[in-house]
Amino acid sequence: MGIVLLGICALLVTTVFVGVRWREKTGGVGQVPPPAPEYARRITALGDEDYDLVLRGGAIVNGVSVTWPFASLLVSRDQIELRVKVLVPIRIARAEVTGVRRVRGLYSRGFKFRTESDRLDKVSFWPVGKAAKQLAELGWY
C-alpha cells in the first residue's frame, strides 16, 4: 500500500511540475507571449476604421478554440490584430512575420503566422470564405 501511495505522490508531483513548466513556456492556456521589444515598438494602436481588411471566422489560440463569429482578424499593411471574444487581442507586427502558412482542416482552410521566435506557433485563424488573396494583396504571404 505504501508503494502505491508513493507512486501516486510521484505522479502528482510530476504532473504539477510539467504543468508549471508548460505555463511558463506558453504563457498559459489562451495566452501568447508578448512580441520581442524590437517588434513591439512597431505595433501602433489602431481603430477599427484604420484597418484595410476585417475577416471573421474561428480561431485556435494555445488551447482555446472559438468558432465563427467569435474571432476576427483585422489586417493592415503593417500589422495584424487577432481578436477572440474571450481573450486579450493578439497584435502582430509585419516585421515579425516570416511567412503565412496555410493549414487545412476537415472542412476549411486556415492560416498560421510564422515567426523567428515561434511565439505564434499555437495560433491559427480560420476565416469564412477565401481570404488568401486578400491577405496577399496587403503583403501578407
Image (cartoon, helix red, strand yellow):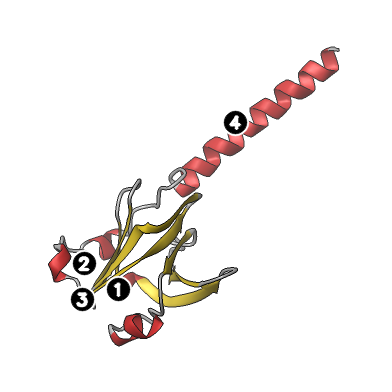
Quarter of the figure with the N terminus:
top right
Whichever of callouts 1 and 2 sits on the residue coming sooner in the sequence is 2
The residue lying at 45 percent from left, 43 percent from top is 28
The image quadrant that residue 42 belongs to is bottom left
In-front residue for pair 115/85: 85
Where disc 4 sits, the SS reads helix
Residue where numbered disc 1 is placed? 94
- Image position, residue 95 (x, y; %): 30, 74
Say whether marks 2 and 4 touch (CB < 8 Å): no
The image's mark for residue 52 is: 3
Where disc 1 sits, the SS reads helix
Whichever of callouts 3 and 2 sits on the residue coming sooner in the sequence is 2
Q: Is residue 57 above or below residue 94?
A: above
Whichever of callouts 2 and 4 sits on the residue coming sooner in the sequence is 4
Where disc 2 sits, the SS reads loop
- Image position, residue 7 (x, y; %): 78, 23
Amino acid under disc 3: Asp
Whichever of callouts 4 and 1 sits on the residue coming sooner in the sequence is 4
Foreground tag (3 vs 1): 3
Say whether marks 3 and 4 touch (CB < 8 Å): no
Quarter of the figure with the C terminus:
bottom left
Q: Seen in the image, is 4 located left or right of residue 83?
A: right
The residue lying at 59 percent from left, 33 percent from top is 17
Amino acid under disc 2: Arg
The image's mark for residue 16 is: 4
Say whether marks 1 and 2 touch (CB < 8 Å): yes
Crowding at mark 3 (Cα within 10 Å: few <14, some 14-19, many 20+): few
Q: Seen in the image, is 5 located left or right of residue 14?
A: right
Where disc 3 sits, the SS reads loop
Residue where numbered disc 2 is placed? 42
Whichever of callouts 3 and 4 sits on the residue coming sooner in the sequence is 4
Gap between marks 3 and 4 measured at Cα: 45 Å
